[in-house]
Amino acid sequence: MFPRSFFLGSVAGFLLLTFCMAEMGPIGRSVSVFSGLYAISFIFLWFIFKTFPGEWPAWKQFFFIFCLALLCRLFFLTFPAAYDINRYIWEGYIYNQGFNPYLHAPNDPVLRPLVNDIWHNINHKDASACYPPLVMLLFSLLASISQGPLFFKSVMILFDLAVIPVLFLMARSRGIGSSRLVFYALNPLVLVFIAGEGHLDTIHLFFTCLSLYFFMEKRDEWGFLTLGCAIMSKYFAFILLPFLVNRQNWKKCHILLIPLLFYLPFWDSGLNLFSSLVPFGTIMHYNDSLTVILRTIFGGNAVWASLALLIMVLGIIFIITHDPLRSSYLAFGWLLLLLSTLHPWYLLLITPFLVFFPSKAWMYLHISALFMFPVLGAEYQTGVFQEIHYLKIFEYLPFYGLLVFNFIKPGRFSILTSFQPVANFSVIIPTLNEERNISGVMEALGQETNIIETIVVDGGSKDKTRIIATDLGACVITGERGRGFQIKKGIDQCHGDIILILHADCRIPQGVFKRIKSTLNGNPQYIGGALGMSYSSESLTNRFLARLNNGRARWAGIAFGDQGQFFRKEALGLMGGFPNQMLMEDVELSLRLKEKGLLCYISKGVTVSERRWAKIGFFKNFWRVVTLCLTYLVLRRLGLGNVKRKDFYNRYYGRM
């Protein structure tokens, strides 16, 4: 525990740095000093988070953070607004004068009588409006009140402040401490580019976060309505739609169309609504990373390659990540990496998600926005906007390194729940006519000292399975046939701290139980995991299958039942109990565990019989397993199919 004085000192230091940055604006006036203050402010932000008084009630934490956020934003009121503010004012102004901004670029001769001081500070005067109609109408409303940049920026700050209570409600719904709100509320990137420069992205953030909150609370009508508003404020939000629609709410999806009414005042624009977006998305590029590689490989077709890659990645996210909030986070993250233009304020798209999924990689990219400051500084000094390519090495190389490292080894920074120490095991073995295998697995388990009970749940064997298991010391019970049903019945009667599910034809070498226990106690953020597997016969096809299975369990967090799945008994309450279904319970268990904690992978943990592969044939069984798994993941995502998955059991084992 840090002393309270350390927390107060961190807050004071952060406020001082924020005030200095605000007084130094704009960024281009003194790039090096501003960049240094910006980077150091993130260090103080981290200390505020680490020393935040966790004993305060949630309302007090929120109130304190909100007051700090408000004070910091007040510092930035006098910070010079971005050039984009002039575009917002101009387009609202000419619309009020009877001109359609989607049809008339600022340098259109018909607008010459309207030229004023705002017009002289607009970038890209040859381009018509590219913003969606909701914000365009907002610009019109604001311009009818005042055409001052400070007024427009103040409205953006109000939307920005409104994001904070929405994030608080979302965090409370997810059971996350309010102290994490600092990652948005006090984020220097937010302060500089929203409170300081006044970019409209905060409107999009507000409606997006509000939509996600409504979906979390099962208020889907409002969720679709606010998602539509998010799309009508910035089109990026459209990619979230597939991750938020399911069987329960798809009939309400039409509500998403209501915000399309914002298009009506611009009905005469036709396809000109998107005319400025086409060159922006196809010709222009700045501060991109992955699309640099795609342009090198595909040349003029890089845009289509980028789009294809994005669709493929979104498809993978759709299949393997079923938490709507995490799916949205991953979707926005990949979108940012595949954009051909990535201004620093575009990173605000990911900032609210840092409250729920803290990431060293994305936090570093927020800090490394300072490598874009020299470009902004050059534009401020000379009016010429030109990319400095070598700076992207310092920006992206560490980012992708951290991204890969965090993927391989999630750190404590990502902890959502910290679990209690564990001491012993309950082993659950589902059986059906396993007299040839049960003695082997029982004898291997008999050598382990950490096992307090081995429960064999038989599905109606007609051989001596139950007799052999009883003689070897197992607690034998009978359950309804269906591997998942049997495992659930065994788990309902177990008492161990760690539950390990083992198939009768699997063998665990000595030392594995000790490794599992040590891993869970050394990493309280791990909720469970799976064992690395190999087949008893080391043929080429078996080694290939083992690598596929191990790779899926390690990288996607989805394990099959013969991979020795284990989890803390403490997790049962969090994930709503063990899946009550005949088959695919192993995949379902993996997905439920992933949603509540981090999963670990213990290499070289179990040896599996290849009997089913030998009996049915490699290609036939491989195709069956792959199609069943993918079908299950898609149906689960959409909320479709038989709840107890009897249809999957019949397809895999044949009808009962």
Image (cartoon, rainbow, N blue to C red):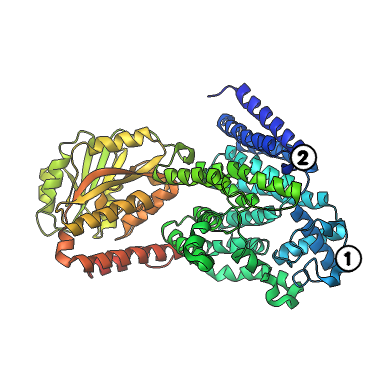
The one nearer the camera, 113 or 645, is: 113
The one nearer the camera, 321 or 457, is: 321
Picture residue at 77% right of the left edge, 68% below the top: 105
Instruction: Give x and y (percent) for residue 304.
Output: 51, 68
Q: Amino acid at mark 2?
A: Leu
Relative to 266, does residue 614 appear above or below in the rendering?
above
Give the labeled residue for mark 2.
74
Q: Residue furthest right?
A: 113
Circles 2 and 1, Cβ within 8 Å, touching? The answer is: no
Binning the other alpha carbons within 10 Å of mark 1 as few (below 14), some (14 to 19) or many (20 upward) gives few
The one nearer the camera, 599 or 438, is: 599
Q: Amino acid at mark 1?
A: Leu
Picture residue at 72% right of the left edge, 51% below the top: 159
Q: Is residue 123 left or right of residue 567?
A: right
Instruction: Give x and y (percent) for residue 272.
Output: 70, 74
Instruction: Give x and y (percent) for residue 449.
Output: 20, 33
Separation of marks 2 and 1 at Cα, in angstroms: 33 Å
Give the labeled residue for mark 1.
114
Regarding mark 2 in the picture, which secondary structure is present there?
helix
Which quadrant is home to the C terminus? bottom left
The one nearer the camera, 77 or 68, is: 77
